[in-house]
Amino acid sequence: MVKFFLNFKKRLNMDMKASKVYNGIMKRADAPTITKALIEWLDNRYEDKTITTEIALNTSLGVKVADVVVSNGHSVAYEIKSAFDTTKRLKEQLLGYSEMFEYVYFVYWADKYELSSLPIPKSTGIIRAYFSDDGVAFKVEKKAKINRNLTPKMGAEFLWKKELRYFLRLKGEKFKMSDDKGRLVELFLKNYKKRDSIKIFRHILKHRFALGFEKYKESKELSVYKKHKCDINYTLEYS
């Protein structure tokens, strides 16, 4: 009986330790934790960049919110699926981002998803998030390919009216201050080809959201991005 009790107690302790480790891992697999770790990973990976979060985008598939966005000479969107997320809208999200961003990545929690069953577009890159001794780590399993279905109109519609007016002035294009955004977008597309509009979209991402990224690096708190989502007074300089 004593031997049985000791064995039972040993198994119970082992189960409790395993449960504690499991719960710790699952706790660290939520979206905010993965997002913070991803920002740090990207910050160390790239130079001369701006990183921001939760950017709402008007796409042909409806409004999609990119979890993390980077502008570093290219425009890159990251869709994160944590251990607690669903992939029900994954295909539409990735295709929507592909209308505006040069590269799109799907970041998934290693212990939750079976990639072969997910509707991931061929051009989308894949990054595995997993738990290591140092916290959440990442591994690029597939590099993203540049999107060929970028839509200049989507990028132009992302611009604010004051941004559109600025770029129209650079071209000497006449417009009225009373012109609505639709008219300004029409004039923008008349003056800027696809390649130029892609470069402008990168530029806007990098500078409009630069203040938020700087504030985040100071505090390391995701809530800072909400307080400093956009710098409406940033200096418009483009050449």
Image: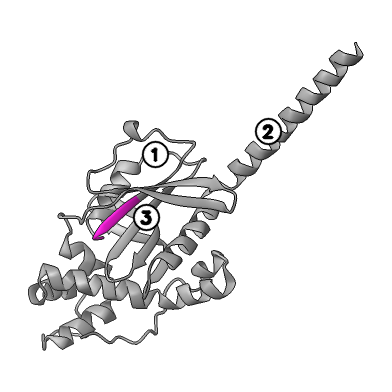
- Mark 2 element type: helix
Closer to the camera, 179 or 194? 194
Report which residue position mark 1 lands on.
87
First-in-chain label (1 vs 3): 3
**Furthest residue to the right?**
2
Left/right placement of residue 133 relative to residue 235 reads right
Residue 78 is marked as: 3
**Furthest residue to the front?**
3
Three-letter code for the amino acid on which mark 2 is drawn: Ala
Residue 136 spot, x, y in % from top left = 53, 51
- Mark 1 element type: loop
Vertically, is 170 above or below 79?
Answer: below
Vertically, is 122 above or below 225?
Answer: above
* Mark nearer the viewer, 1 or 2: 2
Q: Residue at x 22, y 66 (%)?
A: 155
For the residues labelled 3 and 2, the Cα–Cα distance comes to 32 Å
Residue 149 is marked as: none
In which quadrant is the N terminus drawn? top right
**Furthest residue to the top?**
1
Circles 1 and 3 in contact, beta carbons < 8 Å: no
For the residues labelled 1 and 2, the Cα–Cα distance comes to 28 Å
Three-letter code for the amino acid on which mark 3 is drawn: Tyr
Report which residue position mark 2 lands on.
18
Residues in magenta, as a range: 101-105
Indicate yes or no whether the magenta region holds residue 61.
no
Mark 1, Cα crowd under 10 Å, few <14 / some 14-19 / many 20+, is: few
Three-letter code for the amino acid on which mark 1 is drawn: Thr
Circles 1 and 2 in contact, beta carbons < 8 Å: no
Residue 211 spot, x, y in % from top left = 45, 78
Residue 205 spot, x, y in % from top left = 33, 71
The image quarter in which residue 7 lies: top right
